[in-house]
Image (spheres, rainbow, N blue to C red):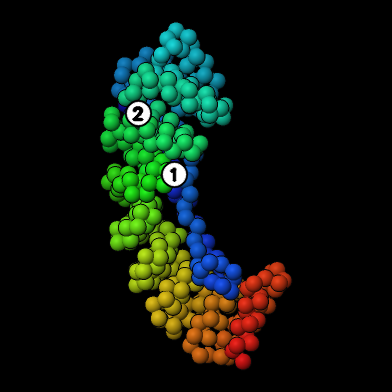
Amino acid sequence: MKRLERTSSLARVGVVLLVVGCGLGCGGSGPSQAEAPKPNLDDKPPQVGAADTGGASAEAMAALEAAEAKNWPDAKAKADAVLLKNPKDAVAHYARGIVAEDADKDLDAAEKHYKAALESDPKLVGASIFLSALYIKREKWDDAAKVARAGLEHAKGTYELHLHLALALHGKGDHALAAKAYANAVTLRPDDGKLRFDHGEELLEAGEKDAAAKAFKGAIAKAKGDSSLIALSGLKLKEVGDLPGCVAAMDQAIAAKASGAFYTERALCKHAAKDVDGARNDLDEAIKIEASSKNHFYAAKFAEDAGDKKACKAHYEQAAKLAAAAKPGTKVEEEAKKGAARCK
C-alpha cells in the first residue's frame, strides 16, 4: 500500500541564473547578482494508504482516494457524507481540506479541516504536511513551525516536515535553526543538489561560511549536469571567498552549457583572483555569444586594468552605444562614456 504522505515540491528549486549589473557602471550594488531559487508551493497529490490511517473507514479512504485523483465533486461528496455521520473523522477532514485548498481555493476552510484532522489524529502525517505547507503559503511562520515539529514527533523520517520546518524557521529569520532543519532534510535526500544549495544559503545567512562552502560544493557534486545550479553554486563560492572553487564551478557549468552568462561569471571570478588575462579571454568568449553593453563594459574595465588603452576605449564606446540603443540616458551609458574618455 502507498503511504499517506504528500510529495512536496516546497524546496526552493526554481534555479535561474540571472547575471545582472556592471558594478557602478550599471548602477548595481556589485559586479554580479544572481536570483536565488524560490519556493514552489504547487504540490503534487497525496499518496494514500490504509496502513497510515489508523484503520480509517472504507468511506473515508474512498474520499481521500478521490481527492488524490483530483475528482473533486466525488471527493467532496464522499467526505461530507462521512463527516455527517462522524464529525471527527480525521481522514474525511483531511480529504475535505485538500478539496478546499486545491479545488475551491478556500484556504480558510482548508486550514479548518486540516486542523480538525490533526485534532482527531495527531499522527496523520499527510495532514501535518499539508497544514504546515498552507501556513508557509500564508507566511504564518510560527504556526508552520509548530505543526511541522508536532508532525515530526510522530514521523521523524518525514522529509517534507523537515523541509517545511526549515522554510518556516527561515521565514522567522532563525537561520541557525533553519540550517539544522535543512541538514536533517539533506540526510533524508542526500542526492538532491538543489536542497544542498538551499542548505548552503541558510548556513551563509547564519554566518557559517566554511559550512556553507561545503554545502555549495555538495550541491555542485549532486547537480547532475544542471548548469544553472552549478553556476549559481559557483557564485556563492565566490561570495564566501573561494575564488578557485568559483572558477572550477564555472568550468563545469560551461562544459555543460556554453552560456555567455557563465563565461561572464567565470571572468569575474578570475578577475577577482587577479587572473586578468584569463578574465579578458572569458569576456571575449562571452561577447561572441552575447554582445551586450554589460559584457563590453566588463571587457573595457578589464582592459583598463591591464593598461590596454585601445581595447579599453573600443569596449567602452561599444558599451555606451549599446546602452543608448536600449535606453538613452542610463548610468551605463554615462559611465561608459567617462571610461572611453579615460582611455584616450
Q: Which residue is mark 2?
A: 125
Disc 1 crowd, CA 10 A, few/some/many (<14, 14-19, 20+): some
Quadrant assignment for the C terminus: bottom right
Mark 2 / mark 1, whichever is N-terminal? 2
Disc 2 crowd, CA 10 A, few/some/many (<14, 14-19, 20+): many
Judge left or right: residue 43 versus residue 296.
left
Residue 325, by quadrant, is: bottom right
Q: Residue at x 35, y 54 (%)?
A: 206
Give x and y (percent) for residue 293: 61, 74
Number of dots carrying numbers: 2
Element marked by disc 2: helix
**In this rendering, is residue 38 above or below 119?**
below
Residue 49 visible in the displayed image: no
Residue 279 visible in the displayed image: yes
**In this rendering, is residue 332 above or below 91?**
below
Which dot marks residue 171? 1
What type is the residue that disc 1 sits on?
A: Gly
